[in-house]
Amino acid sequence: MAQGKKVSIIGAGNVGATICYWLAMRKSCREIVMIDLIEGVARGKALDIAQATSPEGSHTQIKASSDYQALAQSDIVVITAGTPRKPGMSRDDLLLVNANITKGIIEQVVQHAPDAIIITVSNPLDAITYVALKIGKYPRNRVIGMAGILDSSRMETFISEKLGFGYGQVTASVMGGHGDDMVPLPRYSSVNGVALNDLLSVEEMNEIIEKTRYGGAQIVSCMGTSAYYAPANATVKMIEAILSDSHAIFPCATLLEGEYGYKDTVNGVPVVLGKNGIERIVELPLNEQEKQQFDKSIASVNTLLQTLKTHHFFDV
């Protein structure tokens, strides 16, 4: 692990603080800065996390600030700030308010950490990733949306629950947008190398796919707010892959420039993560049904992007 690296997290809410905690506990980097407009909250959580990680012998320095100058020399900037989804609120409802929040943040990141790789976590994820790319004028490898790892982990959990065995051995694959039109791929999923089709019926697999698509909404309905442990863990896996230059393959939201037949839109696809961010986009051969589902996911994200354009969001 690249222990001399600096990671900055914008937003000290549940997701941001949990990312900070796990990075420090895993000793993944040398310095973590949490930035939040409510500086007292960020400082309090930074102190709490530092005191939790000290007995573990963690060398990570944890700092907090409300000043974006603290971003200086960041290798990775994670954006978790935004309005969380409330019960009965769709990801679409979040669009304009969180797009404006992201725009303001990216303007600060460009100024204070111009060389950083950006990981977006705020919802609606795919549209927010597009906003960060366009506002920051970044090459596409430098802005990566966290979604596919989270959606895949949810699918893996539901598969384990249904089977009653194979816990920790399930590998599930989900691509597409982070929302109701995500594209779970049973054909590319397995349990310790055993194909799902040999373990589950079509009806059982369809039930799991449905639960995966609405896994986030289920948590919101239970807690009254969005999930944070699983999203934070997914983000940490991305950070560690970049800092260690592991060239691991993960499903992430990225700008498509001809891949899968689409351009100028963001969607979740398998990518290779390394020191430059996205090192390569992997194009899976999709069957007709999978392609139709992916087309639907693209159309859903494009509807959000068109809403932003209709409101002249990208106009100079």
Image: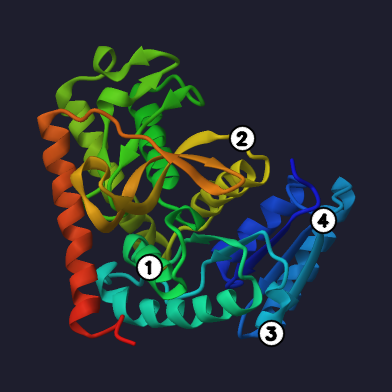
Query: Measuring 38% from the left and 70% from the top, which residue is drawn there?
Result: 134
Residue occupying image coordinates x 34% and y 25% = 189
Residue designated by label 2:
246
- Residue, x 42% and y 75% (percent of image)? 135
The number of numbered badges drawn on the structure is 4
Where does the image place residue 257, in percent across and percent down from the top left?
29, 51
Residue depicted at x 50% and y 75%: 106
Q: Please tell me whether mark 4 or mark 1 is closer to you in this view.
A: 1
Give me the C-alpha separation between circle 4 and circle 3: 20 Å
Quadrant where the image shows the N terminus: top right
- Which residue does the numbered mark 1 point to in the structure image? 128
- Does residue 185 appear left or right of residue 75 in this picture? left
Instruction: Select label 2 or label 1 by which is in front.
Output: 2
Secondary element at tag 4: loop
Question: From the viewer's perspective, is 239 left or right of 185?
Answer: right
The residue carrying mark 4 is 60
Q: Nearer the viewer, residue 236 or 212?
A: 236
The image shows residue 194 at horizontal and vertical percentages of: 37, 12
Q: Which residue is mark 3?
A: 67
Q: CA distance from mark 4 to mark 2?
A: 21 Å
